[in-house]
Image (spheres, coloured by chain):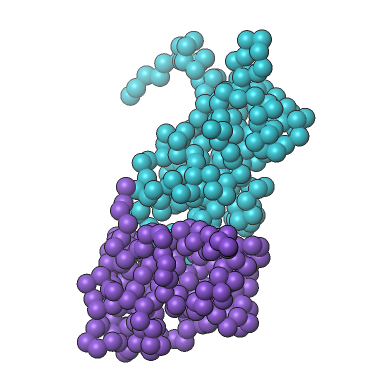
Amino acid sequence: MGTSQPPSPNDRNNTVAVAQSFLSAAELLGEAALARVYTDILLNRPTTNSAIASRLELPASTTSERVTRLKELGIVHDTSDGKANQLVTNPIEFTVSLSDGTVTVTPTIIAAYGAKNQVDDIELFLDRHGRAKLVEAVEYTIAYLDGDLSRRSIGVEMELSSVEAIAITQALEPIVALLHTVDESTPELAQDTHAQNGAATPYVVDE
Amino acid sequence: MTSRPSLVDTPPFEPVPVALLVDTSVLIGLGTTGSSKTDFIEYMTAAEKHVYLSPYVVEELKTDDADEYGVNGWLAEAQQQQSLEVLPPLDEGIRIHDAPKAGVMMDRAHEWLAKLEQRERDDVRKTDPAFAGCFVQLLGGYGYDEVGLVIDDRKAEQALSAVITGTDYESAVRLFRSGEFLEMVREFHRSP
């Protein structure tokens, strides 16, 4: 029989820090508007409030409000030293394990959810199936781009009609392609994603 | 990175075949309203192309989901536009000379796609493989010298290219990637 040891002070600190990161990150999957601003900062870090507002076509006050919320959550940090603010963030990734499997939430999934109010087919899909199914759709879109499956076979796997499988994979494809550069969890994709980069996504990457 | 299958055309595409099959994946990308759809229809008319919808594509466009995702309007277009037509059910026995029959080509494409995806054949829907039969139907039954398919699915194009290559149909079939084809359509409208 094993002996359980009480966590050391360092472990306790780590547990609290990790739990806080997890809870903060989970907030992003509850608020699409926040997820969108987080994704924009991730793609353009370091950046400023005004640059975010310009890229996302948001009023300055709305941008400032959302950035403040992300800072309060500990997701975004301001590294400025007296100059214009320099907002930075890191790729968020956390794995949830349950008795019947695990799922990893990645920057690409957060970006897909953040596109909800800008991409009609993502919004419709979320309304019909919810966030959990969107996570699955992102995973299968990566599988499509990696050359594993046709769009219609994704429909079979996800128990969706061909029309819906095609529509959601096409909607997610440019987001997966764009996030590929910052999401280390995405494998090297077999398909050339260059053509999809930036196409029909609600995100802009400054040159 | 995967290479381009041999039958998948590389731009510039001209001359484009007169007879073109168009997959649901393209129609969804075009939407029901907006300039992309209008540009596409105008190109077909101005460039004197004839677009065919396969029976399997038509079945997909009749579903409730097609309505939800705003793509069912293409069936109404097929009734109104002279350049857009629904193909009748596949005549499986049709062929050119001694080349494989339409039903055989569809069957082979089904087998190939299942093999490429490492799936049971019964788990692979028939819409993509059926294009291989539709090529033969258009070449043998409608008298076209050349047919094309516009599609946005890399796995499907890979399977179709593989089964057509090496048959007597090889020189008469061309596959076009949706994004590249629609760029050509936009270019067509931009040119004076």
Q: Is residue A16 above or below residue A180?
A: above
Which image quadrant: the N terminus of chain A? top left
Image location of residue A164, percent across then percent down: 54, 62
Image location of residue A25, percent across then percent down: 58, 31
Could you tell me which residue is drawn at 31 percent across and 51 percent down? B2
Between residue A92 and residue A195, name the one nearer to us: A195
- Left or right: B187, with B130 as reference point: right
User: Which chain is represented by cyan in the image?
Assistant: A
Residue B177 in sight: yes
Task: Please tell me in which quadrant of the rendered image residue B191 appears.
Answer: bottom right
Q: Is residue A53 above or below residue B56?
A: above
Task: Please tell me in which quadrant of the rendered image residue B65 appears.
Answer: bottom right
Image location of residue A89, percent across then percent down: 56, 25
Could you tell me which residue is drawn at 62 percent across and 14 percent down? A80
Between residue B35 and residue A127, name the one nearer to us: B35
Residue B149 in sight: no
Between residue A39 and residue B37, name the one nearer to us: B37
Could you tell me which residue is drawn at 47 percent across and 62 percent down? B181
Image location of residue A12, percent across then percent down: 50, 15
Q: Is residue A41 above or below residue A172?
A: above
Q: Colour of chain B?
A: purple
Q: Is residue A157 above or below residue A6?
A: below
Could you tell me which residue is drawn at 44 percent across and 52 percent down? A140
Between residue A113 and residue A47, name the one nearer to us: A47
The number of discs equals: 0
